[in-house]
Image (spheres, helix red, strand yellow):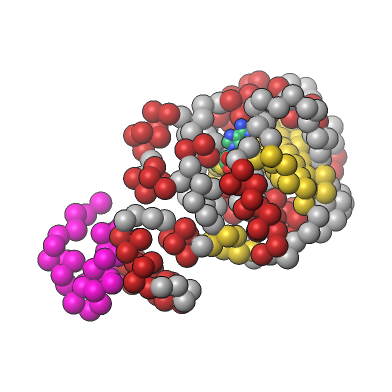
Amino acid sequence: MPRISPAMIRKVASYDPLLGLLLPVCRTAEAARQELHWIRNEGASVQRACALRARSVPLQYVLGSQPFGELEILCKRNVLIPRWETEEWASELAARWQTSRVTAPTVVDLCTGTGCVALLLKRALPRAQVTAIDCSPFAIALVTKNLHHNDIRDVTVLQRDILRDDRPAIAADLVVCNPPYIPRDAFVRDVTTSVKMYEPRLALVADKEFYTNLCDVWLRHTRSFVYEIGDISQAHFVADRISATTWSVGIRRDSNGKPRVVYGFKTDDVQLNKLYDGFGYLVR
Ligand SMILES: C[S@@+](CC[C@H](N)C(=O)[O-])C[C@H]1O[C@@H](n2cnc3c(N)ncnc32)[C@H](O)[C@@H]1O
C-alpha cells in the first residue's frame, strides 16, 4: 500500500478540500473522487459525511444503506454491513432455487444480521417460508426495518442464540448462514482498523463453533445447507464431520478465487442433485 504524503493530500485538496479529507481513508485520488460522488448523490450532509469518513467510519454507516442484489439494505452501527462475497453466492443460490421444482421451500437464515440473505431469498421466492434468526437485538430491529423498507412481508424474525438455544430447530429445505468465522488471532492480525473500530465483534469473531452447530443440530432438520466460510479448513471441518453416506458436500469459490461457501445436500435427493449441480465442486 503506497504511503500518502502531505504533498499528495495538498494536491487533491487544491481541487476540492473534501477530497483532501477523504484521501487518507480511500487511499487513492480516484477512490476519493468516487466516494465524494456517492456522498453527493445520496443528498447526505456532505461536510458531515466526509468528516465521518475521515475518521474511518464505513461508508455504508455514513450513507445508511448498501445495495444487495436488487434490494437496498439499511445499515446501522452494531450490525454487520453486507459484503459483496455474500451477495454473490446468495444471488446464485436464489436463481437456482427459482428455477427448481420446489416452488415453496422452507428456508432458515441463521445469523441474519441486516436480514440481507433472508430478504434476497424471499424476494426471489415469494412463496418460500423464510425465518431469519439472530441473537443481537440490534440485528432483529434492523431486519424488521429492512422488511418494511423493501416492502417484503411474511418473513418470521426470531431472536435466538443458536449456540445455546435448546428449543427444537425448525425443519427446512434449506438452511443458510453467514456465521462469525474469523479466528481471534486472525482478527487481531488481519482485519482492517475500520472494521475493528466500527463493526460488531459479535458478528465477526468465532472459531468453528457455528460449523459444529450445523453438523450437530441443523443437519438433522434440513435437506440442504449453504454456509459462508473464510477459510478452506472450515469446509473440510464440515465435510469430515458429516456422514459420507447421507450427504454430498461441496465448496464454492468467490470471484476472487477464494473458497467462500461450504454447501451440502442429501445425496439421494434427485431434485437437489440437479439444483446444486455446478454451484461449486463436490469434495465428498
Ligand atoms: C457475519 S454476520 C452475518 C450477517 C448477515 N447474514 C450478512 O451476511 O451480512 C454474523 C451474525 O451472526 C450473529 N450471531 C453471532 N453469534 C450468534 C449466535 N450465537 N446466535 C445467533 N446469531 C449470532 C451476529 O449478531 C451477526 O449478525
Q: Which of 220/16 is in front? A: 16
The answer, for residue 271, to whether it is visible in the render is yes
Q: Quadrant of residue 262?
A: top right
Assess whether residue 2 is covered by the magenta stretch.
yes
With respect to residue 221, does 25 lie above or below?
Answer: below
Task: Dividing the image into four quarters, tell me where ligand 1 lies.
Answer: top right
Name which residue lies at 16% across and 66% down: 8
Q: Quadrant of residue 16?
A: bottom left
Assess whether residue 212 is covered by the magenta stretch.
no
- Residue 90 x/y as whole percent: 65, 51
The answer, for residue 90, to whether it is visible in the render is no
- Residue 226 x/y as whole percent: 67, 40
Q: Which of 137/182 is in front? A: 137
- Residue 159 x/y as whole percent: 69, 39
- Residue 199 x/y as whole percent: 46, 46
Q: Which of 45/66 is in front? A: 45
| Overall secondary structure of the magenta section | helix
- In the image: residue 225, left or right of residue 196: right
Total labels: the figure holds: 0
Name which residue lies at 56% across and 26% down: 208
Name which residue lies at 37% across and 49% down: 194
- In the image: residue 51, left or right of residue 199: left
The magenta span reads 1-30
Name which residue lies at 21% across and 73% down: 13
